[in-house]
Amino acid sequence: MKKLNNIAVLTSGGDAPGMNAAVRAVVRTGIYHQLNVFGVMYGYRGILKNEIFPMESKSVANIIQRGGTILKTARCKEFYEYEGRKKAYENLKKHNIDGLIVIGGDGSFNGAQKFSQEFDIPCIGLPGTIDKDIAGTDSTIGFDTAVNTAIEAIDKIRDTADAHDRLFVIEVMGRDAGYIALHSGIATGAEHIMVPERKTELNDIIEELQANERRKKLVNLIVVAEGDETGGANEVARRIKESCPQLDTRVCILGHIQRGGSPSCTDRILASRMGYAAVDALLEGIHNVMIGIVNDKIHYTPLDKAVKAKQEIDPEWFKIVKILAS
Ligand SMILES: Nc1ncnc2c1ncn2[C@@H]1O[C@H](COP(=O)(O)OP(=O)(O)O)[C@@H](O)[C@H]1O
Ligand SMILES: O=P(O)(O)OC[C@H]1O[C@](O)(COP(=O)(O)O)[C@@H](O)[C@@H]1O
Ligand SMILES: [Mg+2]
């Protein structure tokens, strides 16, 4: 097995709370094993611009509790092309990098997969995305924090909804995945949850809202994922207002607040375990996999299998929503 000496770490795609804790774990585990650890600024763009610098233990002091990412993040068009990836390889070679750890989402893993097939630098992926839209892990770094941010906000909306007897349509993030909507909706007692994984019959919801009105249910919360096929909260509210003009309907789009803030305990621990496991994998000669945690155990998934697949959501979840909010 080739001896590992120099590894690099970067964050790519949408940021997620806990990415800093993962960077810290990679750096400190690498140093523990006497590796030289390099940070790359701005994801793949930073490799192309040669923004690669040595990191020490103190480079990651005081970041475990911080949201965002000290390495910054970016989306990089050039990396989609072979020429871009070749330039990236040449820059990494200038620093004798022999292992790359990519903290990001499905897009970042697609890039890492291509790169590792074309060039002799093994890559390890760590799932960092609030959407939890990645196969091969029970959760992703940032999801728990984002859901907790969403429920804190929705609880506040419930207070004012209750005061005015209003219906609120609340949009949460999730470009192609409904996990933030599903979890935050159940945790706040929403009457309806709309997600891209399941076709929503808005007419059925409207009928139920009318029935709710007959039995004097005064607060109604609908949580909709931004990627739902109906087109999001504004469109849902427009259609409800059309059919139920008697309901006092309001919209709230939570937006990027869900991406920020101090990571939860769960995300800090997930990120720390995954960062540690990523360095371990490189040292063991395990290459081109994503580190996941499944049933509380470290789990490796080949990078090409870890990419976003529309996952089935068990219909029982929706039964729970219906029964508990009735
Ligand atoms: N198919 C691909 N081939 C090569 N690089 C890719 C590919 N998909 C994404 N990337 C790289 O990964 C970056 C981040 O991907 P993106 O989908 O924006 O975010 P995320 O990783 O959060 O899903 C892109 O800007 C690009 O540089
Ligand atoms: O901040 P941007 O670039 O508008 O991206 C918004 C998207 O990023 C996310 O917050 C996270 O998605 P990724 O982790 O795949 O980047 C989505 O929920 C949202 O649709
Ligand atoms: Mg993505």
Image (spheres, rainbow, N blue to C red):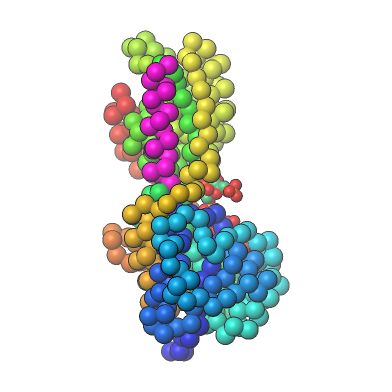
Of residues 128 and 211, the one nearer the viewer is: 128
Q: Is residue 199 magenta?
A: no
Q: Residue 297 location, x and y as percent?
A: 29, 65
Of residues 101 and 303, the one drawn nearer to the viewer in this rendering: 101
Residue in the image at 41% along x and 85% along y: 34
Residue occupying image coordinates x 57% and y 76%: 53
Q: Quadrant of residue 280?
A: bottom left
Q: Which residues are magenta?
A: 146-164
> In the rendered view of the protein, which quadrant contains the C terminus?
top left
Rendering coords of residue 310 (x, y %): 47, 49
Is the residue 202 above or below the residue 197 in the image? Answer: above
Residue 151 sits in which quadrant?
Answer: top left
Count of marks overlaid on the render: 0
Q: Please, is residue 319 above or below residue 267 in the view? A: above
Name the quadrant of the N terminus.
bottom left
Residue 173 placement, left or right of 159: right
Judged left or right of residue 105, residue 187 is left
- Residue 293 position within the rendered picture, expressed as x and y whole percent measured from the top left: 34, 62
For residue 62, which quarter of the picture?
bottom left
